[in-house]
Amino acid sequence: MRVCPQFERILIASKTHILYVITDLELGGVPLHLLHLTIAMRDRGFRPTVVSLSPPGPVGDRLCDADIPVFDCDGRGGWDVRIIARLGALLRDLKPDLVHSLLFHANTAARLAAWDTGFPASRIACEIQTVEVERRWHLVIDRWTHRLCRCTIGNSPSVIEHLATEARIPRDRLQLVRGGIDPTRMSTVNAIDRVELGLSAGDRMILWVGRVDPVKGLNLLLDAFRRLRVSADVHLVLAGEGPTRDELMHKSHSLGLADRVHWLGSRDDVASLYRAADLFVFPSRTEGLPNALLEAMAAGCPIVTTDVAGCRDLIEHDETGLVVPFGDAAALADAMHELLKDREFARRLGDAAARRVASDWHIDHTYDGYAAVYAQMLSTLSSTKEL
């Protein structure tokens, strides 16, 4: 187990100590969410510490740079049961007031380590940020172990509904804390010069951002792009990495799209990509609350997405974007064509999406929600009664 060298200096603070437990600290939506959450909670008067089940990755370095103490359990995969004892040892040594875990493996490890060490279940909040449709055994484990924590947090109405109906967690043990972003971060960035992306200045740009994974529907997007009834100056730009990238690149070549599909890999400047896009397309099979979709909304992008969990929480058809059934490449192509053809309609949808994020999905509301959950948990610290 490792720790940031500045830990002892930070430990002397007397504020409420929250131990955040996460599966890993690689670059990704939930680790980056945790980075911002710990900083925000520290600014609100809490004292955060982070434990990663796996050796910390790049987000661990960013946490240390922000003076957030980081430990790890040196886990070597999802089935490394040694992490439970290591996490239990940290619970005994650090004696946090509260534990907040995020992601399935971290939730399971936190529940079992707390049970093994006698740490009160009433002081543990676990969080799920996805609607699980592929690894349904996760839902079975959650059903068996949910009583080993005070509550399970979901970041969207779709996640809460899925946990209630599919994992069968009682609704009185579920807590909605709506996710969000800081919309000013998107609205104040300049658009990237399209020439830097291999496009001509007059080309039109369809954008997708995310992890290149089967659940993201990129096979569908390539099929729809091939069907698109527009001129050759429309290009598809994809920003992200993942296990199926090589397979999808091969498919784009086999479809004859190699000169109009651009694979950018991971980018640190996605805000400038949103600002440059004529259209943002997000054809996922399922989501929890997609950060890329929130960012595209905040940037004022016209949006086409699928009528699935997570996406339907954000986009209202014909109001803040266009929504099509998942798996229907023809419908996806038609929606993209409509917004590329009718620029005024596209602009109205993009403007409405930006307003919706600012009013309903601002990150300040998210942090208020977490603080309320913590306050509720802290109010019972003096009680010995377990839920």
Image (cartoon, helix red, strand yellow):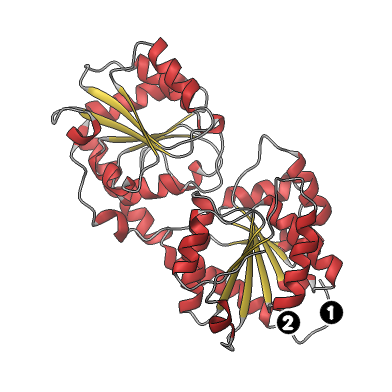
Task: Return the residue nearer the eye: 352 or 204.
Answer: 204
Mark 1 Cα-neighbour bin, 10 Å: few <14, some 14–19, many ≥20:
few
- Vertical placement of 221 versus 194: above or below? above
Q: Which labelled disc corresponds to residue 380?
A: 2
Determine the secondary structure under disc 2.
Answer: loop
Residue marked by disc 1: 385
For image coordinates 45% across by 40% down, the residue present is: 210
- Place of residue 184 in the rendered image (x, y in percent of width and height, measured from the top left): 30, 60
Apparent side of residue 138 relative to residue 7 in the rendered image (left or right):
right
Q: Which amino acid does label 2 sit on?
A: Thr
Residue 124 in view = yes
Apparent side of residue 7 relative to residue 141 in the rendered image (left or right):
left
Does the CB distance between marks 2 and 1 fall below 8 Å? yes
Q: Which labelled disc corresponds to residue 318?
A: none
- Vertical placement of 268 versus 283: above or below? below
For image coordinates 36% across by 39% down, the residue present is: 321
Q: Which of marks 2 and 1 is nearer the N terminus?
A: 2
For image coordinates 76% across by 54% down, the residue present is: 169
